[in-house]
Image (cartoon, rainbow, N blue to C red):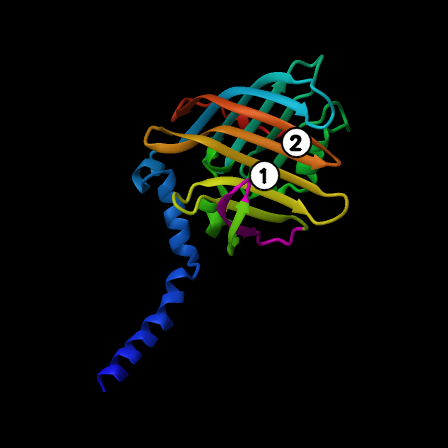
Amino acid sequence: MRYLAVWIALLALLSVSPAKDEFQPGDFIRQHLNSIGTDQARAAVKNRLAQGTVSSQVVNGGPQVWDGQETFVSEGDRFASLLKFAPSVYRTEWFVRDGQRTSVAPVRPGRYTALSQFVMVHNEILTEGLWGGTLSTGWAVSRLEENHAHLQDRGLKKVDGRELRRVDYIPKKSSDLEIQLYFEPDTFRHVMTVYLIVQRPLIQLAERFADFRSIDNVMLPGRWTIEYTHGRMDRYEVTEEKISHNISLDPKNFDIK
């Protein structure tokens, strides 16, 4: 009888153990948001200004590198993202969301870069608050209810030699993009987003985040790498030199032109 009781107890343990590993969206979101900061620390941030440098290169197109300045300003679900280069060597990438509408700046009237064309066509990257990851105060994972979006767990995946947890972002409106979010399984920090169109040749936009540091008790990435693959790969390396919170902002930052 004692052996039977032990066997029953063992079966009970085995039956409940998978539940511990089952993906629970609410718990996952809470742990991820806590990796950024406490509820109080995040709530204290009304706006954010990130400023730094950016270098641009066609990875498989030669050694030429263009250097410029980067600015990312956000307030709630509004933001403006600027990658500014000297007009003589490269064109500026400028994405804006005013809370309702989005704008992507052309190189000149009717002409867009490959990256800006992709973002303009797939503007859910901007409207959902995905662009810039946790650098944005309107980060998509913190606004799932407002966006009526949900997450779908894909388990641990090997990425660049390390294990990351892949969670797909499913927007309310149908999209031909496969939106993959990657998190460190131990810290729950968001370290990469991949926007993928499954076709030949591969079309993919990836944002990678690294060098996290605490700013006003909020953990934010100091390095942001943008890679757009469309036959060739365009890479933008952003280094955030200064991140400020709760500054006086000109509402014109978010004007749609």
Q: Which residue ends up furthest to the front in the rendered image? A: 3
- Residue at the spot 51% in from the left edge and 23% down from the top edge: 239
**SS of the residue under disc 1:** helix
Q: Are marks 2 and 1 in contact (CB under 8 Å)?
A: yes
13 lies above or below 23 = below
Disc 2 and disc 1: Cα gap in Å?
10 Å
Q: Provide residue 43's location: percent of width, then percent of height.
A: 35, 38
Q: Nearer the viewer, residue 56 or 137?
A: 56
Q: Nearer the viewer, residue 170 or 173?
A: 170
25 lies above or below 69 = below
What amino acid is labelled 1 in the image? Leu
Q: Earlier in the sequence, mark 2 or mark 1?
A: 2
What amino acid is labelled 2 in the image? Val
Are there few (<14), some (14-19), or many (20+) residues within 10 Å of tag 2?
A: many
Residue 113 lies left or right of residue 3; in this view the side is right
Q: Does the stretch in magenta take in 172?
A: yes
The disc at residue 191 is none
Range drawn in magenta: 159-175
Quarter placement of the N terminus: bottom left
Residue to which mark 1 is pinned: 126
Q: Which residue ends up furthest to the bottom in the rendered image? A: 1
Q: Provide residue 10's location: percent of width, then percent of height.
A: 31, 74
The disc at residue 104 is 2
